[in-house]
Amino acid sequence: MKKLLVSLGFVALCVSLYFWSTKKWGVTTNIPAGIKVLNDIEKNGVPKFTLKDIHGDTVSLEDFADKVVILNFWASWCEPCVDEFPTLIKLIKHFKGKIVLIAISADHTESDMNNFIRAFDVKDPFIKVLWDKEKTVASSYGTKILPETYVLGHNFKVLRKIIGVDKWYTNEAILFFESIVNDQAM
């Protein structure tokens, strides 16, 4: 009987310590929203969307299932976005249609977005610039910081998520994207 009471006391002590430590050290079972979105994307695939591009044409993510897609969330008022955009353009031109850039603008006005695109003279058919006026697409991806970019392999498999600015036209980047383009399984 004494052993049973000691055992029960020990179990009660362990349970109490567990609950005390989770409060004291901030351990929680609440998963941050960004992680929840990534978990959901991993489980169910990337959120599909359809938006109008700068020419008024309807563009759907599903149109590019056979391509490697760089999905970039940006805005003209975002200085790091402005810094990285030329390297994205160079990368897309380098791959001559094997990679598509879907650049989703979080600009406050359509004219801000259009002025930005005109400044960079974006006329490549493999660069799709879309305006997410209501920020619904960005929200579905959990995007809160710009720039944010997803690299999607064939059939929209998430290969990488980059939060913040990156240099897209480097030797390392070219080798990385060549490996994706050449591997249909990715």
Image (cartoon, rainbow, N blue to C red):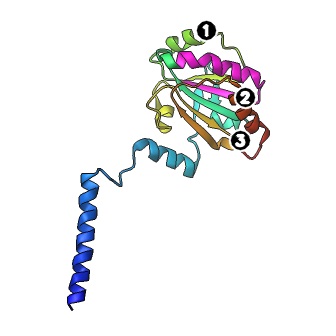
Disc marking residue 118: 1
Q: Is residue 141 above or below residue 7?
A: above
Q: Earlier in the sequence, mark 1 or mark 3?
A: 1
Q: Earlier in the sequence, mark 2 or mark 1?
A: 1
The CA span between labels 3 and 2 is 17 Å
Disc marking residue 33: none
Q: Which residue is mark 3?
A: 154
Magenta run includes residue 92 = yes
Q: Which residues are magenta?
A: 81-104
Left of 160 or right of it: where is 141?
Answer: left
Magenta run includes residue 167 = no
Left of 120 or right of it: where is 164?
Answer: left
Q: Position of residue 86 (x, y in %)?
A: 63, 16
Q: Position of residue 95 (x, y in %)?
A: 76, 26
The N terminus: image quadrant: bottom left
Q: Is residue 78 above or below residue 144?
A: above
Dot 1: within a 10 Å radius of its alpha carbon, few (fewer than 14), some, or many (20 or more) residues?
few
Q: Which of the 4 image quadrants contains residue 155? A: top right
- Closer to the camera in the image, 19 or 103: 19
Q: Position of residue 141 (x, y in %)?
A: 50, 37
Which residue is located at x 27 percent, y 75 percent? 11
Q: Which residue type carries mark 2? A: Ile
The C terminus: image quadrant: top right
Q: Secondary structure at mark 3?
A: helix
Q: Position of residue 183 (x, y in %)?
A: 77, 42
Q: Which of the 4 image quadrants contains residue 120? A: top right
Q: Which residue type carries mark 1? A: Arg
Q: Which residue is mark 2?
A: 174
